[in-house]
Amino acid sequence: MSHEEAFELLAPLALDALDPEVRLHVDAHVESCLDCRRELDELREVAAALGNTIESPPEDLWARIASNLYEDPIDVTSLPPLLIEYPVSEIPRGGRVARRARIIVAATLLAAAAAIFALAINLSSESGRVANLQSELQTSAVRQALATPGHRLVTMSGNNNKVLATFVVLHDGTGYLVSSKLTPLPAGEAYQMWGIVDGTPVSIGVMGSQPRHWRARRALPYSASPWNLRAVRSHRRTRWWPQERCRSAAELEDSVTTPAIIRGAITTGSRPFRKGRRLWHIVSFTLSGIAGGVTQQFM
Amino acid sequence: MGDLGEASDAQLVMLVARYDEVALAEIYRRHGGAVFGLARRVINNQTEAEDVTQEIFLRLWSQPERFDPARGTLRSFLLTQTHARAVDVIRSLNSSRRRELNDAARTARSGYDVHREAWDVLVSQEVLKALQEIPVEERRVIELAYFEGHTYVQVAEILHVPEGTVKGRIRNGMRRMRGELARQGIEGVD
């Protein structure tokens, strides 16, 4: 879409009066065009002025909102997922694989039948679509992500290299938690995911006290140099905003009460191999043990 | 920060990012009525409007960094999100249900001039004044799009005028309003 075409549609966009497909095109242009963004911001202020009415909300509405603040906003009906690992030695030949690489096969436990389905990325079609698990996965966003060609799986491991969480990352950097075996935390604490980019910690989002469904708040690197990811426990309801305060990885380590719970890294490159009649996708990644001791109490 | 009542909206959002519930409650106190009012105005349904309001505040709670004070006021940020969500809701309703809601809303406001009804609930005299400067055909397309959730293509069908004309009227109407509001010294809602 040209700048002129997009610019013409900014006023309808500010009124949410575009068809979804057209809107996608305009949004994409606005994202990269400072002039359009400024214009859109101003038009949105005008639209907001139109909508600036005041009514008294029902008295109990705030209480309902407050009661939901610490609940997982997404579907929580699914059972905790299960992760299965295949050791490297079982990988049939098919190119060099990093020594510590493993195939991670994530599986979900079916609610009723407790049947286990292996999640594999079947590369027999060029798109690399996930073959088996679509109907079993509970959230459509994750399902869509796993069905998106070129997605990557990232695993994070804790003690004994045990995989505790698996994420899917798309080309555009969107990342979702696919499955997690992280121990539920007491009320008032939450897992927070950090990326260490060039030595600087970047908060990728808080996953809640019992992570099940989660979307990364920031774009994750898809093909750039790997980011080290780590999840830490952070206390809720504190006057603490690590994103503001930590300027280096060391400072992050110093400012949290617990060591990294899980660590992992997104690495580039993945190799298919053949097993049976299927071509499987090997996701290689680096593993590291849990980080060293508890550091100092933060403010 | 001793008294949250004195804090700016941007400061409150910073506190929300630190999981300060009281700060969120203060934001709700300031803007909850506007969010709910707009949602109800667009959806014409109390329960759905409550759900949208809840969703908007939970979203602010979980993703406070999406608010960028450099790009506008918190009120307009919340209203922008509210409107988009409310429009999603009504577009997801099937057409007969939507008609039902619209009819119910019309009955409730019977006696109002249809062309004026959308503006009557506006609280800001300045906005009302700005609107009076806009030609009625421009107001009409903006009203159909903004308050009834139609796309501009649908508005063209409803009014039996070419799409390009509707697009132009929306654009001109919005620009005229912006000019008027600016003339009155209003740069954003808060």
Image (cartoon, grey):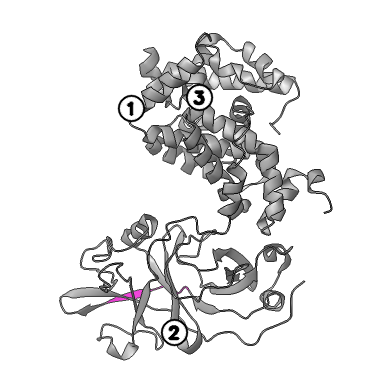
- The image quadrant that residue A60 belongs to is top right
Q: Are marks 2 and 3 on the same chain?
A: no
Judged by depth in the image, the label closer to the viewer, 3 or 1, is: 1
Is residue A124 in view from this perspective? Answer: yes
Q: Which residue is mark 3?
A: B147
Q: Nearer the viewer, mark 2 or mark 1?
A: 1
Callouts 2 and 1 in the same chain: no
Going 29% across and 83% down the picture, which residue do you hit? A95
In the image, taking residue B117 as reference, residue B32 lies left or right, namely right
Task: Residue B75: give x, y in percent of width and height.
Answer: 66, 37
Secondary structure under badge 3? loop
Give me the residue at 84% from left, 53% from top: B2
**Relative to residue A77, is residue A30 depicted above or below?**
above
Mark 2 crowdedness (10 Å alpha carbons): few <14, some 14-19, many ≥20: some
Can the viewer see residue B168 in this picture?
A: no
The circle drawn on residue A162 is 2
Please give the range of residues in magenta. A266-272
The residue at which mark 1 appears reads as: B95
* Picture coordinates of residue B82, whole percent (x, y): 54, 37
Q: Circle 1 sits in a helix, a strand or a loop, which is it? A: helix
**C-beta proximity under 8 Å, tags 2 and 3:** no
Residue count near mark 3 (Cα–Cα under 10 Å), binned few <14, some 14–19, many ≥20: many
> How far apart are labels 2 and 1 at the CA level?
52 Å
